[in-house]
């Protein structure tokens, strides 16, 4: 089974899925979270209790990486050039060169640098923990926001629904709920929001490594990349 993932350029400022975006056909996506917690054994803890104790200090540090393997195909790509949208069909080889050039660039080169990875996943539950539905005011995508702004919410998913009844959203490390609510209980100042629609922000960061194989026997190119989430400056 294959899925499309999307690389967004620094020049993508409106969360568009089609402009300043490079689509890739992924055969596998591997997500890795490695938490850093300083720990040390407590001296003499086993004398009184009969069990040794290790103390750990959770400082909220983790490294998050996403590895993608797949193929690059000839694709139409639209980019903002001189404040105009220009669409051209690029060969797989040109797209591979474009990605390699982007990895080699810095954030100052906004038409080259890649700072966001979109991996679409199926979802049935919105950011407010209600099932997905539709609002009479199309600006809102969950029941709480819809009704708070005078809209009428119509549920489209229930306990018997399948993933085909839901919607696709970007994979993120955000949790459902506002500050100190739902899954964010105990989090007073969250820095990202759980996505409710497919054009919401995905994973921001940088491509740690990119490689591809050029073969004379096929037009498509196999590739692998490793993306690391981070706050990029500039």
Image (cartoon, rainbow, N blue to C red):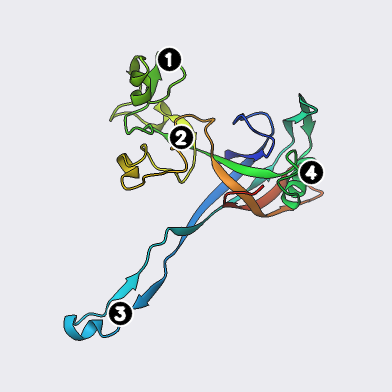
The residue located at (57%, 51%) in the rendering is: 230
In three-dimensional space, the C-alpha distance between marks 3 and 2, rounded to whole angstroms, equals 42 Å
Label 3 or label 2, whichever comes before in sequence order: 3
In three-dimensional space, the C-alpha distance between marks 2 and 4, rounded to whole angstroms, equals 33 Å
Q: Which residue is mark 2?
A: 195
| Looking at the image, residue 207 lies above or below residue 112 | below
In percent of width and height, residue 148 lies at 34, 20
In three-dimensional space, the C-alpha distance between marks 1 and 3, rounded to whole angstroms, equals 58 Å
Q: Is residue 61 left or right of residue 41?
A: right
The residue located at (54%, 40%) in the rendering is: 202
Element on which disc 2 rests: loop
Q: Which mark is residue 93?
A: 4
Q: Closer to the camera, 85 or 221?
A: 85
Task: Check if mark 1's residue and mark 2's residue have beta carbons within 8 Å.
Answer: no
Q: Which residue is mark 3?
A: 42
Element on which disc 4 rests: helix
Element on which disc 3 rests: loop
Task: Check if mark 4's residue and mark 1's residue have beta carbons within 8 Å.
Answer: no
In three-dimensional space, the C-alpha distance between marks 4 and 1, rounded to whole angstroms, equals 44 Å
- Within 10 Å of disc 4 (Cα), the crowding (few <14, some 14-19, many 20+) is some
The residue located at (37%, 39%) in the rendering is: 176
Label 3 or label 4, whichever comes before in sequence order: 3
Label 4 or label 1, whichever comes before in sequence order: 4
Q: Nearer the viewer, mark 1 or mark 3?
A: 3
Q: Count every numbered label the image shows and give the total.
A: 4
Element on which disc 1 rests: loop
- Within 10 Å of disc 3 (Cα), the crowding (few <14, some 14-19, many 20+) is few
């Amino acid at each position: 089974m294959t899925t499309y993932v999307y690389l967004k350029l620094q020049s993508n400022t409106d969360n568009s899925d089609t402009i300043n975006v490079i689509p890739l056909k992924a055969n596998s996506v591997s997500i890795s979270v490695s938490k850093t917690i300083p720990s040390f054994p407590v001296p003499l803890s086993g004398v009184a209790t009969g069990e040794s104790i290790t103390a750990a200090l959770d400082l909220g540090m983790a490294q998050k990486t996403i590895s993608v393997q797949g193929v690059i195909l000839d694709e139409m790509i639209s980019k903002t050039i001189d404040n105009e949208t220009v669409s051209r069909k690029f060969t797989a080889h040109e797209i591979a060169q474009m990605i390699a050039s982007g990895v080699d660039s810095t954030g100052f080169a906004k038409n080259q640098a890649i700072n966001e990875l979109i991996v679409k996943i199926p979802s049935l539950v919105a950011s407010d923990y209600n099932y997905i539905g539709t609002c009479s005011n199309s600006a809102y995508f969950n029941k709480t926001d819809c009704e708070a702004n005078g809209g009428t919410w119509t549920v489209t998913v229930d306990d018997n629904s399948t993933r085909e009844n839901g919607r696709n959203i970007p994979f993120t490390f955000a949790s459902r709920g506002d500050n100190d609510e739902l899954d964010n209980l105990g989090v007073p100042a969250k820095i990202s929001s759980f996505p409710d629609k497919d054009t919401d922000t995905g994973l921001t960061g940088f491509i740690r490594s990119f490689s591809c194989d050029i073969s004379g026997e096929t037009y498509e190119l196999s590739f692998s990349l490793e993306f690391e989430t981070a706050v990029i400056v500039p």
